[in-house]
Amino acid sequence: MDFTFTQEQEQVRETVRRFAAAEITPIAKHHDDAETFPRDMFRKWGDLGLLGVRYPAADGGSGMDKISDCIVREELSYASQAFASTWSAHTHLGIWPIWKAGTQAQKDKYLGPAFAGTKVSAFGLSEPGGGSNIRALTTKAEKTDGGWRISGAKTYITNSPFADFMLLAARTSPELKPHAISLFIVDLPNPAVVIHRLEKEGIRASETGLIHIDGLELPNEALLGHETGTYPIIMDSLSENRVGVAANCIGMARAAHDAAIDYARERVIAGKRLGEYQAIAHKLADIATDIEAARWLVYHGAWLVDQGKLTTPMAAKVKLFASEVAVRASEQAIRILGGAGIMRDYPVGRIHRDALVYVIGEGTSEVQRNMIARDLKL
């Protein structure tokens, strides 16, 4: 068993860490307050090869492994989870199904611009009335002579307010079964797709939309892989992304912990530094232990992806634990800072709001527990 990162993986970490410190950290609070995302960041990510980390060089990607993908996520999230969320929605959810199941023509059209950051993607899955039950989605795709006609609604769709294309999940037959759900590639803007920008409490700089689709006409070529019933591709994408999101959570937890340590070293109360009080030192020790446990669970999950051995229950365990750690770490950081913890001059409040998103998004903690419990065959 080898628990060390390779030299190449450490170089990836250092590159992303330097980039994030120079390009993201100085503007993270501004964009959080303004609830906007700087679109030119995609070009910068593309220039560094960060948008194609997960994909083979033969397909135009950077040819790295899932462990490297998780390193990128961790370091981006350390600087800003809103920026990392925007990156993730594009480079994984919005691209991975095309790479995995698209026709060569679809790959040629979308992957190159997506890796370069000249076109941005979104993933249209969640619906206003569906919650976490993907199989119950109601967006309907009806066959026409020349292709498909789609109507329905999607909500909480990251990147949709400025995306150039979107993977859209729709029901291609009425049965409430997996084979009835398919993915379509939709170029944006489109007059039949109306996107309302949503205001949020967490990951505020990551732009999110509510989408109404009324009579969207698409050609046959827009159907992913020219095949209906691509629900397994959706599930595979979500399982792998749960490991990735868990790496994001490590970054948030680390950022909150480091902010609390810095404050505990500098703040003096009754002649003693805050960190010299045992109650505070124990809180910081507990957070450090949680983060270390989460780190190795996440990178074991990434290793399983690279070995082709990741299971749905394992992905659920990774995401459940890491997301709960991020929430605990950021909450304890606020408590350690006390009154300063709820001031916007300090980052811990923003980190906590962002962390709360991930005990809900990408499958709630309750859904993760359901998947783990099913595997126990109770």
Image (cartoon, helix red, strand yellow):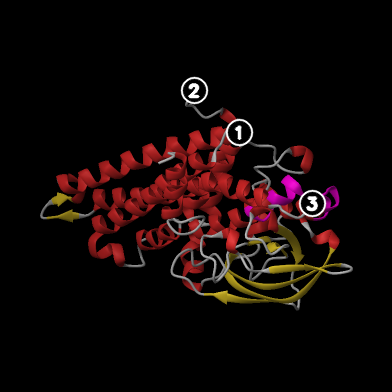
Query: Which of the two discs, 2 and 1, labels the residue nearer the N terminus?
Result: 2
Callouts 2 and 1 close, C-beta under 8 Å: no
Disc 1 residue type?
A: Asp
Q: Residue at x 46, y 53 (%)?
A: 367
Q: How far apart in space, not on screen, are marks 2 and 3 (Cα)?
A: 38 Å
Q: Picture coordinates of residue 97 (x, y %)?
A: 70, 50
Res. 2 mark? 2
For this orientation, the residue located farthest to the right is 145
Magenta residues span: 93-109
- The residue at which mark 1 appears reads as 306
Residue at the spot of label 3 = 225
> x, y (%) of residue 203?
48, 63
**Res 355 → quadrant:** bottom left
What is the magenta segment's predominant secondary structure? helix
Q: Neighbour class for label 2 at 10 Å: few (<14), some, many (≥20)?
A: few
Which callout, 2 or 3, points at the residue further toward the start of the chain?
2
Furthest residue in direction left, as rendered:
270
Q: Is residue 98 a member of the stretch shown in magenta?
A: yes
Query: In this view of the protein, which residue sits in the foreground, 64 or 94?
Result: 94
For the residue labelled by badge 2, is the local secondary structure a helix, a strand or a loop?
loop
